[in-house]
Image: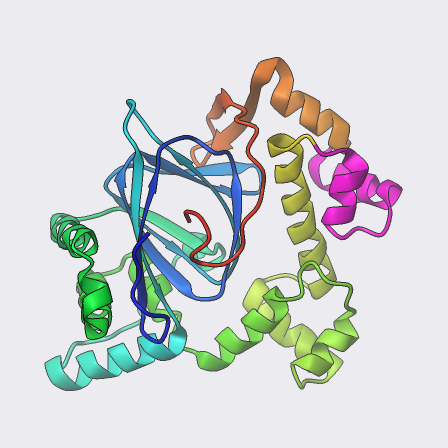
Amino acid sequence: MTAARISQPMIVKYVQQERNGIQSHQLTRHCIGYVVRGRKYIYYGDVRHVVNQGDVFYLGLGNHYTEDIPESGRMFEQIAFFYSSEQLSRILSQLNMNYQLDIRHDHRCPVCEHQSHVVMPAWSTLRNFFGSINQYLKDDLFEQDTTAALLKTTELIYLILSQKGTCLKNKVLGNTDLTQENFEQLVLQHVFEDISVEELAQKCHRSLTSFKKEFCRHFHEPPHKWFIRQRLMHARLLLISTNQSVSEIGLSSHFPNTSHFIKLFKKEYGMTPAQYRHQHRQGGVEAMEDEAGMALSFPVEGGVVAGEGEACGCL
């Protein structure tokens, strides 16, 4: 893995030889990635989104569940850029002042606005760009020149903004609100902690009423319902990717007791955790649905949901 220094936008190349199962990542910066070789899965609820070779993807702040698939006996390869809202704001100001780039946040799409990731095929210019980045990483040029990471991130943002009406552009331009990022980061830090809504409102320096209104604006659900859903999604992936017991999974997903966990899980998914695990692992395969709604099956690799931070494992 090769990366530029954290003080600048960070550029990482990840190479994986074997399939390691579903991994969990908690991002503290925004990510734009490109699959050089192989295939990637992004899990959201019961839907599995596929990122094919040559696709570009965006991941927002917070928890993401992904799986990287080497194909045809060759290693999985991916390049990822990480940046903060503050770094993006400086880049956009630079593009606006020096090149009079017309920066408009004019794309409205209910799909991308209500999910924390986007996947799309890279156009030819973008594919060529990532090809050059691949060579930079092979030659360790970002380690030798810390300014290079910023320049290349600026170029990437320019290429994305030059496209009209894409979900990717929409996501990037939605990252410029520092107040929003700080609010979301503080909430995301406490997903798996024992904290009340009142305490979280105090940490955000807001009244309870103001906090709930702002929370719904950012996450599109009331706080209590959103926190339960996030923990259930985490538990669901533990059920199909580990051999932990139901009680262990309930505890690690921060439910107060097993019976309460089972009750909430059944209400969300229509079956108990044990039934869910049996259905998705019966016969040594787990069945998921891709974004088109087609049932898919693939081997359970025995991978675990683990690994936090933007540079821990592959994203």
Q: Which stretch appears magenta?
A: 244-271
Res. 156 in view:
no
Examine the image and state in which quarter residue 258 appears.
Answer: top right
Name the residue at the top extreme: 283
Q: Residue at x 40, y 64 (%)?
A: 30
Residue 244 image position (x, y, % from top left): 72, 34
In the rendered view, does 65 fall on the left or right side of 196?
left
Q: How is the image coloured?
A: rainbow
Examine the image and state in which quarter residue 102 appears.
Answer: bottom left
- Per the image, is 183 magenta? no
The number of callouts visible is: 0
Q: Residue at x 74, y 61 (%)?
A: 224
Residue 87 image position (x, y, % from top left): 33, 77
Question: Which secondary structure class fits the magenta region best?
Answer: helix
Residue 227 image position (x, y, % from top left): 69, 58
In the rendered view, does 288 fall on the left or right side of 173?
right
Q: Residue at x 43, y 78 (%)?
A: 177
Residue 270 image position (x, y, % from top left): 73, 33
Q: Is residue 218 above or below residue 282?
A: below
Q: Residue at x 67, y 77 (%)?
A: 211
Res. 41 in view:
yes
In the rendered view, does 53 fall on the left or right side of 229?
left
